Image: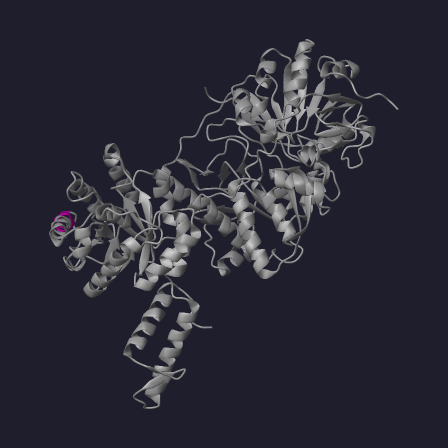
Amino acid sequence: MNQKVVSSITEALHRTEIKDGMTLSFHHHLRNGDYVLNLVMAAVRELGLKDMTINASAIFDCHLPLVDLIRDNTVTALECNYMGALVGRSISAGILEKPVIFRTHGGRPADLERGKAHIDIAFIAAPTTDTQGNISGKYGPSACGSLGYAFSDARYADKVVAVTDNLAPYPLTDFSIPETEVDYVVPVEQIGDPAGIVSGTTRITRDPIGLLMADMAAEAISASGLLQDGFSFQTGAGGASLAAAFALEKIMLREGIRGSFASGGITSQLVDMQKKGCFETLLDVQCFDLGAVESIRDNPQHREISASRYASPCTDDAVVDSLDVVILGATEVDTSFNVNVHTNSQGLIMGGSGGHSDTAAGAKLAIIIAPLMRARIPLIVDHMHTISTPGETVDMLVTQYGIAVNPNQVELADRLRQNRLKVISVEELQEIAENICGKPKALKNEGRIVAEVHYRDGSIIDTIRQACS
Amino acid sequence: MIRSLLFIPGNSPVMLQNGAVLPADALILDLEDAVATDQKDAARTLVASALHTVDYPKEIIVRINSFDSDYWQQDLEEIIPLRPQAIMPTKCSDSSTIRSIAEKISELERQSNIGEGTVKLIPLIETARGVLNAYEIASASPRIVALLLGGEDLTADLQCERTKGGKEIFYSRSSIVIAARAAGVEPIDTPFTDVDDDEGLIEDAKLALSLGFSGKAVISPRHLAAINEIFSPQAEAVKYAREVISAIEGAKKAGKGVASLHGKMIDAPIVSRAKRVLEQARRLGLPLED
């Protein structure tokens, strides 16, 4: 048996024969509690390595030390599917010379599969691994549940290093990533902060406007004709999304509808719905809270799936292609229903597509829920800073002032009207908001390109420019 | 028919924006207690701006500062030209203050070319004297369309503790209902102030309904659905009202002087109540057929 356990991250770096200019990958299941990226990159800097590319499925605010690594040229390129506002602000300011590559959750594994992206060394934050590298996210003090985004890294990277704070004796039977894909195992004191690992918003909003929109969305789903036995559904972990799921649960239980599956990031809310019979199965690429972590460990109907199976356009039958309904958010929407989830009203990076455009493309009904105004900023704009998801894949926009249906969905609009839902054009919604807030002056971000937004098929759907200072 | 009246702080732009889409029958845009003294001017400007720009598809009531404050006249001067449906004077203890406020409103209506009497009044009764003079207050001006009981200030004036059960305001609630009904205006109940106690809210609202209140003020949008539900005619009541009207019409056709239903004679008050229930249901768009 090979001896895979090494004494430190630095030793692992030596064993992998790391050198300048390599691409290192990380997954984001530890979310804003992740220590692994910072631990590894501190060791990389210590070795004096330069010109590294980081390919992380997501970068959170906890990864702010990256900014210093960029300043001293340890890191000169970033690739991710999502970027938190803290690091995003520095990227928007132009700290990195090469444009960041933003992918989608489906596009990232697809680019690895089709050879458009390459990982030299993958670092897998492993809540539990045995001495040979059989990895599970379900057990240990830093349990995060699903490891869906790490599967492709383990499969396609030249070298794979598991970093763990819970080294188990061989063999770990309930593993997600097999030992055949792992080269080294590094025990460390702690791979993450449990409070940040399950940091997703997991409480139903108490905001009356959020609740109002959630009810409207659930009624719209009911009116769409898609809510019947075998129904499949995905929603996010934000307060309004959870409220929409809760409103949908009430309808499903009242009408005795047994859905097929709920997918994507899984919350306690969806776990409860599955237990109550609303769904047969949960297909989980990421757990958002402790309830979901417990469920994926104990409930055989709660299945872990890879990001590739979840959303890759290279997969023959990705889960997103079987979705009936997805509920998504937006920072901006234009009158062609294009959606921005990458940048804020000042053009600063504060998010990313994640699975947004994958699910919008795959689902039969893609719903955007967003308040028509945030403070004094209207949601609907003439020209967006960034197109994350193309409007032709978005079917309706639910706001507190009514529901705008994409003009290419005439039958859907009729169904909503027949069910006494308030259907209103996106232009009328824009006018309502501008009457109240005024029309914001367009920003002129004419600086150099700081990020490219890659659509799931690999094409560049938009670019993000350096923000005005 | 106003079942729910939601207080919106006059210094909250977000609440003023979103009030239009909340399921309240009426909004009370508040310039009084929700607004600190150093924010009075800003709130007045904000409320005026909201009335100017937001299309509120519901009744708009503006709660002005009390008659003994320095602000009530300026409140009226800036708000009346924007034609709210009603003004809510506060701490109303006798009819003289109502008449003074009504006169000021008349003057401002004339100046603004608004038909005199357009803007209505909903006095807030929240003192012991106000409770004792409730009928006199309710009858003080033809502008008055309702009385609202304010339980919090009232219990402070009564020097007793405000409780969830509300036994300390039972007499006042009954007095307001009797005074309002006697004057031909609507009695509106005080808000339930614990925003997290849904069961307590329902119990409190049902008590108010049973006493004769036609609606209830609320301080949290989360209370609106329950209040609207409780103060709407229930399906059973609509069904019974329909049967009553049907029985009366049947008796008329048959040339009978007296009608009966389920073995009981139907008299004038029953018919009157049935008509009222059906009218309420019609206004609310509730189903009138099975």
A155 left or right, relative to B61 = right
Residue B66, x across and y down, in percent: 19, 44
Q: Which residue is depicted at the point 63% across and 27% down? A: A80
Rendered location of residue B126, percent (x, y)? 23, 50
Residue depicted at 47% across the width and 47% down the height:
A211
Which image quadrant is residue B49 in?
Answer: top left
Query: Which of the pair A247/B149 is nearer the observer?
Result: B149
Q: Nearer the viewer, residue A46 or A89?
A: A46
Q: Tally the numbered discs.
A: 0
Residue stretch in magenta: B106-111
Q: Position of residue A361 (x, y in %)?
A: 63, 43
> Would you place residue A43 above or below residue A337 in this image?
above
User: Where B116 falls versus A11 (above or below)?
Assistant: below
Q: How is the image coloured?
A: one colour
Dominant secondary-structure state across the stretch colored magenta: helix
**Viewer can see residue A377:** yes
Relative side of B101 to A25, left or right: left
For the point 61% across and 14% down, which residue is it? A69
Q: Quadrant of residue A142?
A: top right
In the image, residue B107 lies in the stretch drawn in magenta = yes
Quadrant of image for the N terminus of chain B = bottom left
Asked whether residue B2 is in view, the answer is: no
Nearer to me, A278 or A210 = A278
Q: Residue furthest top?
A: A48
- Return the x and y of residue B129 as percentages of the image width and height: 16, 52
Would residue A287 be counted in the magenta stretch? Answer: no
Query: Looking at this rendering, what residue extends furthest in the bottom direction?
Result: B255
Q: Is residue B256 above or below residue A35?
A: below
